[in-house]
Image (spheres, grey):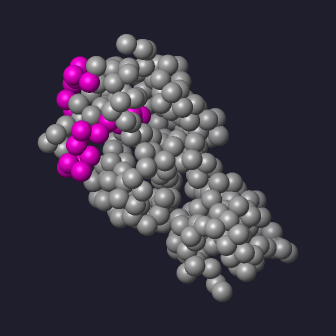
Amino acid sequence: MANVLNAPFIRSFVKTTSNMYRLGWDERNGGNISYLLKEEEVAEYLDLNGVIRTIPLGFDAKALAGKYFLVTGTGKYFKNVEEDPETNAGIFRIAANGLDAELLWGYKDGGKFTSELPAHLMSHIARLKADPENRVVLHSHPTYTLAMNFVHELDEKKFTHTLWEMCTECIVVFPDGVGILPWMLCGTNSIGEATAKKMEEFRLVVWGMHGIYGSGKTLDETFGLVETVEKAAQIYMLTAHLPRLNTIKDSEMKELAEFFGVNYRKDFLNL
Ligand code: 2HA
Ligand code: ZN
């Protein structure tokens, strides 16, 4: 059987965690990623009957029973995934009862999946209903997005509108806008349920004064979504205290969305 460390899904996972770390978005153990794998791609590298351990999930994920996930480990640092993926991440299947993770690879030091697994799996359930091709959920603490949380109203329309105004391509990249949750205790089923509810409508969800969740079909696409929000937030934070002489007008954003044929949140523009 081929070495799983050479699998494209591990290579792209490692590359993503390293990029996020180097961008300063995932200090210490900040951030987590879950990647829904296809059974046939896992079977190329791992014995599907070789369950190493069974780990209780702590919530009901029956809607995902039999599905395979590659997920960062709890307490683990994005910085270290590249040099030792097998300790810092794991691959598991959701058991038929929907209540356990059946570990097939990883968490080598006896560890387990991220404490934010409820938010991840509940978001996967919500996103798969909106888009059957959705495979990635990622959480991060991007610097400027977080800074913006402290100085900008945490209102979905106003926050999205400000981001859209900051980069010409924003309305095309995330026409569905950004959902926002108020500050909440993290690592709980409650924040997981609240995140998943927002994910029914948005691929991006800000956790007030904490960070952001993004979802998408591939790691690149999902990373790119968060990267685009972060770039817009950076422009905002670099200019918010200066007199604004120019802006991208709502009529221009509409023109962009129509030219690129994206289904944008019309109620987030003031036309
Ligand atoms: O896993 O970012 O929200 C570390 C975190 C918790
Ligand atoms: Zn976090």
Residue placed most toward the observer, 143 or 266: 266
Give the quadrant of the N terminus: top left
Q: Residue at x 49, y 47 (%)?
A: 217
Residue 19, how many percent across, how many down? 61, 35
Kindly give the residue lying farthest to the right in the view shown. Answer: 245
Does residue 119 appear in this view? Answer: no
Q: In the image, is residue 111 part of the stretch drawn in magenta?
A: no
Residue 69, how many percent across, how many down? 35, 36
Q: Is residue 245 left or right of residue 175?
A: right
Compared to 201, does 19 lie above or below?
Answer: above
Residue 24, how many percent across, how many down? 62, 40
Q: Residue at x 47, y 51 (%)?
A: 215
Residue 10, how many percent across, how many down? 48, 27
Q: In the image, is residue 58 part of the stretch drawn in magenta?
A: yes
Residue placed most toward the observer, 163 or 26: 163
Kindly give the residue lying farthest to the left in the view shown. Answer: 97
Q: Give the magenta range.
A: 48-75
Q: Residue at x 26, y 24 (%)?
A: 48
Compared to 54, does 99 lie above or below?
Answer: below
Q: Quadrant of residue 45?
A: top left
Give the quadrant of the C terminus: bottom right
Q: Is residue 61 left or right of residue 6?
A: left
Q: Quadrant of residue 194?
A: bottom left
Q: Residue at x 31, y 59 (%)?
A: 193
Number of dots carrying numbers: 0
Compared to 148, does 47 lie above or below?
Answer: above
Does residue 115 appear in this view? Answer: yes
